[in-house]
Image (cartoon, grey):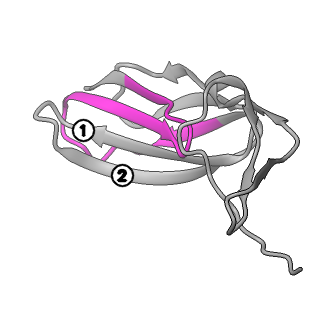
Amino acid sequence: THNIDYSSYDNSPFAGVTYYRLKQTDFNGAYTYSEIIAVSNTLNEISISNLRPNPTSDNVTFDIYSPVRGKATIQIMDYLGQMVSDDTQTVGEGTSTINVKMSELPKGVYSLKVSFTGSGVVSITKVVKN
């Protein structure tokens, strides 16, 4: 007998609790199941709030709440849907405040898209630059 180490990722977990077990199949077709484990997915609790100031003449700031440490991708799109800014920032557990530079952008209406890596959480907010 020898040990084999392996890993697997659930790229689309359900919100809340998901139950997992492994099925081991031998070469002769016999199989056994592992113990069932419960994994709690709290990424559905991620939220974006308090975008300020809007409209802006310079930069904007917003708060992001996350139950876990991770990466947030912040993109700004112009009215044609063209990406004019793309940034990734590390977000800590709890509430973090993120500043987004808009001072170099021309006046207009933009979409601020914030997505949290691996969570499926995406927030899109209209921002007016004066």
Q: Mark 2 belongs to which amino acid?
A: Asp
Residue 109 percent coordinates (x, y):
21, 25
Query: In the figure, is residue 102 to the left or right of 130?
Result: right
Q: Amino acid at mark 1?
A: Met
Which mark, by number, is residue 86?
Answer: 2
Label 2 vs 1, first from the N-terminus: 1
Taking the spot 52% from the left edge, 32% from the top edge, the residue there is 61
**Magenta stretch bounds:** 97-124
Residue density around tag 1, few if under 14, some if 14–19, many if 20 or more, within 10 Å = some
The residue at the point 74 percent across, 40 percent down is: 68
Q: Does residue 4 show up magenta in the picture?
A: no
Q: Secondary structure at mark 1?
A: strand
Q: Measuring from the top left, give residue 76's x and y in whole percent.
A: 31, 40
What x and y, as percent, mark residue 94?
Answer: 77, 33
* Residue beneath disc 1: 77
Q: Residue furthest bottom?
A: 2
Dots 2 and 1: beta carbons under 8 Å? Answer: no
Residue 52 seen in render: yes
Q: Left or right? Give the position of 72 relative to 127.
A: right
State which quarter of the image contains the N terminus: bottom right
Residue 102 in view: no
Q: Nearer the viewer, residue 10 or 29?
A: 29
